């Protein structure tokens, strides 16, 4: 069975369930995962969670398909998503993405402010650390049990496995193996381990470049506009770590050049694009001729600070490329 028919079946199952209070619910589609866009993972998890009943109905229908591959895969998927372990993972990943997705989206945005970015990263890390506790795990377990019961799943609790007993040697008095519950095993081997890996990854990935990016954040449009209005707001330790990265740099001179650059930033940006008029028109006749051709154009070719502040403006990378065009060096 082709993907289009499977998608159509999922659509129909959603429509059949959209009755009563759910009559206005939006029909959703499960999209493919992307290795470069982690927000796609969040969307898929969200659809599976919110449309779980429709997904169960879809797999039940597909398991009766005449296509062997489709029916076999549907039965396997149905057995997998009906397990309590899957619900636990679904809830866990959903909570992790609810913390990391806003930060991930901002880091992928075009006009990124590095100071704001690191504030979001630190905030996400703090939330993940807070999530790593016995109380939060108990909340996750209870939420998963309720979800399983509400959707009439065959498993609604941790599945205890039989403990193999070791044969005692002659003279042994006590057992030396430690017996832990399935809940405790999941908490230690999955819940805590997953959060530890994510927290460690965030720490290792961003801590090394934090101070450099804070200095480079001064090249963002908003920071330049802020300094141009009031040079005194510039932090006293600006470009301190940049001087450690680029040897023989004069910090005092660099700060002065930055302040001058911020004051002329508006004029430099306005020179990138062509103005409405290239020449000063002195004669009334010439003005009338031009006005006929440019009825829909604006005669104002100056960009104010307020207008640039309202727009997104160029990115920090674009500003870095702008400097050499005016024979300016950072």
Image (cartoon, rainbow, N blue to C red):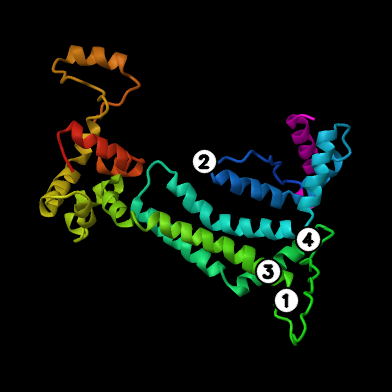
Horizontal and vertical percent position of residue 189: 63, 65
Decide whether residue 15 is among the magenta residues.
Answer: yes
Of the pair 270 and 248, the residue shown nearer to us = 248
Residue that badge 4 annotates: 148
N-term mark: 4 or 2: 2
Residue that badge 1 annotates: 179
* Alpha-carbon span between mark 3 and mark 2: 32 Å
Residue that badge 2 annotates: 36
Q: Is residue 37 above or below residue 167?
A: above
Of the pair 234 and 167, the residue shown nearer to us = 167
Horizontal and vertical percent position of residue 122: 42, 61
Q: Secondary structure at mark 1?
A: loop
Residue at 17% of width from left, 47% of height from top? 258
- Which is the main secondary structure of the residues drawn in magenta? helix
Q: Is residue 215 above or below residue 9?
A: below
Residue that badge 3 annotates: 185
Tell which tag, 1 or 3, sits nearer the viewer.
Answer: 1
Q: Quadrant of residue 170?
A: bottom right
* Alpha-carbon span between mark 1 and mark 4: 26 Å
N-term mark: 1 or 4: 4
Tags 1 and 3 touching, CB below 8 Å: no
Q: Secondary structure at mark 3?
A: helix
Left or right: where 170 falls relative to 243: right
N-term mark: 3 or 4: 4
* Alpha-carbon span between mark 3 and mark 4: 20 Å
N-term mark: 3 or 2: 2
Tags 4 and 2 touching, CB below 8 Å: no
Residue at 77% of width from left, 43% of height from top? 14
* Alpha-carbon span between mark 1 and mark 3: 10 Å
Q: Residues within 10 Å of mark 2 (few under 14, many from 20)?
A: few
């Amino acid at each position: 069975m082709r993907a289009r028919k499977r998608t159509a079946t999922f659509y129909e199952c959603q429509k059949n369930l959209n009755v009563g209070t759910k009559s206005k619910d939006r029909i959703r589609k499960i999209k493919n995962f992307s290795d470069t866009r982690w927000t796609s993972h969040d969307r898929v998890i969200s659809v599976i969670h919110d449309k779980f009943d429709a997904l169960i109905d879809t797999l039940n229908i597909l398991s009766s398909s005449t296509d062997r591959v489709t029916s076999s895969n549907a039965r396997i998927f149905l057995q997998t998503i009906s397990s309590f372990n899957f619900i636990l993972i679904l809830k866990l990943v959903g909570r992790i993405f609810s913390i990391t997705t806003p930060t991930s989206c901002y880091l992928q945005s075009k006009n990124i402010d590095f100071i704001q970015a690191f504030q979001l990263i630190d905030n996400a890390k703090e939330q993940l650390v807070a999530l790593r506790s016995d109380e939060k795990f108990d909340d996750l377990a209870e939420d998963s049990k309720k979800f399983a019961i509400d959707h009439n799943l065959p498993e609604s609790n941790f599945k205890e496995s039989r403990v193999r007993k070791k044969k005692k040697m002659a003279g042994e008095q006590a057992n030396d193996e430690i017996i832990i519950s399935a809940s405790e095993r999941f908490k230690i081997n999955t819940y805590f381990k997953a959060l530890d890996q994510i927290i460690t990854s965030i720490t290792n990935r961003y801590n090394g470049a934090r101070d450099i990016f804070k200095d480079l954040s001064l090249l963002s449009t908003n920071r330049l506009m802020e300094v141009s209005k009031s040079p005194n707001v510039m932090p006293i330790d600006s470009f301190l770590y940049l001087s450690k990265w680029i040897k023989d740099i004069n910090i005092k001179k660099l700060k002065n050049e930055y302040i001058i650059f911020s004051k002329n930033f508006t004029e430099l940006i306005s020179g990138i694009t062509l103005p409405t008029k290239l020449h000063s028109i002195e004669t009334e006749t010439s003005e009338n001729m031009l006005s006929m051709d440019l009825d829909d154009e604006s005669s104002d070719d100056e960009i104010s600070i307020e207008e640039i502040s309202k727009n997104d403006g160029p990115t920090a990378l674009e500003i870095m490329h702008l400097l050499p065009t005016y024979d300016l060096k950072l």
